[in-house]
Amino acid sequence: MSDPQYSETNEVSGREQDTVSLFSPRLYGIAILVFAIILTGIFFISKFTQMDLSRDMQTWQEKLSLIAESRSKEMNEWVDRHFSELHALSDNPALQLYLSELQSLSESTKNAGQSEEPAQKTYLRNLIMFTAERSGYLSSSVSSSLIGANIQESNESGLAVLDAQHRIVVSTATSAAIREKIIFNAKLSQPGRDSFIDITRHENRLLVGFSVPIFSIQGDRDAQAQIGRVVGIKVVDASFFSLLKHPGVTERTLETVLIRLQQNNQIEYISPLMDGSEPLSKQLQDTPGRYAEFALMTTIGGFFDKRDDYRGVPVLATSRAISQTPWVMLVKIDRKEALAESDQRRASMIAFFFFIIAIIVLIILAVWWHAHSKRAMMMSYHFKKIAAEAKAQESLLRLVADHQPEPIFILDSQHHFQFANKQAADEAEMSIENLIGKTINDVRGSARSERLIASCEKATEQQSTMYAIQQVVDGEQERVLRCAFVPLAHIPMTQLPYPSPGVLVVEQDISDVVHEREQRIQTHHQLIQTLIRLVDKRDPHAADHSMMVSHLACEVAIEMELPASMVDATKMAASLMNIGKIIVPQELLTKAQPLSEEERRLIQDSMMMAADIVRDVRFDGPVIETLRQWQERWNGSGPLGMSGDSILISARIIAVANAFIGMISPRSWRHATPIAEASKFLMNESGALFDQRVVVALINYVENHHGAAWLTRIIEGRRNVA
């Protein structure tokens, strides 16, 4: 019979245990996971909104730029067209001739009481009348009559021809104020240059002007040849501002305006504005925060965001400069209107994403709660599943490994086979079942096993993957294997009673690759030796020169501790440096007298062709570029103008080695330079013609590493042959 007090105590204890388990570390882990999911979701939502906003900004930048390019093209064509019309008039040979003749009339002839006007002046009147009517410099309210320089009319547009003293010779019917404006701007114009007369307001009208120089008919087009100037003043009407309107625009706040920066650091709006402001009626102080000021003071053509316009409203905008004018064209749209649809879309997406995050969090909490209540059952199911997955993974590993072309096997710490694929078993001429458990010595033999065991132990010691190239003699066939040794903390095999460390070994047969590379290298060397013998045969005075330079350059490269690939490239390029002499006439190579400057240049140019001769030959290192650069000088005085460290180190080494060998070798027109003097010359020219580090390495080899003895032996051998 049970004790009720004992039962109650156990029940309370169980509840306490359940309470404790609710606040176990697992619960804190779930809380951290939920918090991490929320933070991650917020981060990715933020990144998404930024990317979406960037895409919308890019779209609007492209759209505004397209409109800006279209409208600026129209404005530039409008300005260019007016200058072209005046240039057609100023470049008229008849105008140039008659204006020169009118200015050559003496004051005595003018004061002689001659009342009849010169025919040249009459012609000029007719000419500018035709141009004015054609180009729109006459308003419809003014008759087609022309006036002289001393008659005033009320036309606000005008076209005039001025002489070199800025006096009006002939003009259309214009008011006195317009005539004064023409003369004033002509005086301000830079001699020999076109001049743009910026928009101004005159009696409730906007005027703009253009001024081009007139040159003498036989003179140059410069300030000294200027004999006058054509000045045109035109009324700016609605047709001009219509050029700013882009067809097909449906956005309510999209606006294209013209602005200019005044001398008082104020920004003046030239065109009518969306708020109803008339042209030239609104100015903004040049202060930070104004997008127009930003457009003027930064690179034209940029894209501006979060800048307030003249209404104090944030806008998206881009700008373009109008050529030959001080105008800047701005294309803008209210940021709120431009991004209204995308802002709504992003708000919806953010709400959706937060909803998804909330659902995920709730699912995680529900799963955790269910797992907490059903832990025992789930653990049992989990272990069964893990065992099944492990078995399936082992089968999958076996399937994959058996279909690999290379032998793959795993050795434990005692060098026993714990796993082998079909290729490893076939090479051992055993079944996989018989191979497992045997030592590597029993399967591969002691000689081959020693190298494998040493590599396995080294990989285990360093705990990093190692690679080794091994040569294997299989009967009469020699194979080259590239072996990979991967250390394993434990071998994932179910039959092992406890975790055992081991090494995964993969043997890849690279015999064909190695043999192909050796054959290519041998072919290269044979080609090089053939070319060198051919050059030596044509130039007996420089026989063995390439060989000596190649040997010395190789030693210097080793002295400088360059990588093996760069050492080989240096040696190869030095061997080929003189093959360009093939194109040099043999009588020039064997000439006993000193060479002329032209002959020296021919031989030097032939050396530059060495790279072109072998450019289609495949080399492992920068041999071709070294052949192109070895004649460069440290101070940039070489044929290509390269200097300093921009020259390949291999080319710098060959330059020093070639100069040294050339000096210590005798020639038909001079004696050999002693080694000490040649070394002194190199030191004197280091930092100018040669790299000082290379010079020091060469001298160190010659003086301290038996280089002098080798050079002396070569030179003495040449003398004995001679």
Image (tube, rainbow, N blue to C red):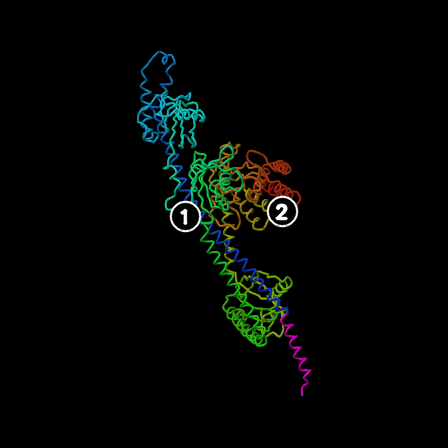
Label 2 environment density (alpha carbons within 10 Å; few <14, some 14–19, many ≥20): some
The Cα–Cα distance between marks 2 and 1, rounded to whole angstroms, is 73 Å
Q: Where, quadrant-wise, is the N terminus in this rendering?
A: bottom right
Q: Is residue 295 left or right of residue 680?
A: left
- Residue 205 % position (x, y): 39, 32
Relative height, residue 507 to residue 275 (above, below): below
Relative height, residue 380 to residue 322 (above, below): below
- Residue 492 % position (x, y): 58, 70
Q: Where, quadrant-wise, is the C terminus in this rendering?
A: top right
Magenta span covers which residues? Answer: 1-23
- Residue 104 % position (x, y): 38, 17
Query: Which three-letter amino acid code belongs to the residue tagged 1?
Result: Glu
Q: How many marks?
A: 2
Label 1 environment density (alpha carbons within 10 Å; few <14, some 14–19, many ≥20): few
**Helix, strand or loop at disc 1?**
loop
Query: Which three-letter amino acid code belongs to the residue tagged 2?
Result: Glu
Relative height, residue 101 to residue 543 (above, below): above
- Residue 448 % position (x, y): 59, 66
Residue 559, label in figure: 2
Label located before the other in sequence (2 or 1): 1
User: Which residue is labeled 1 in the image?
Assistant: 251
What secondary structure is the magenta-colored segment mainly? helix
Considering depth in this image, is 115 or 216 the residue closer to the camera? 115
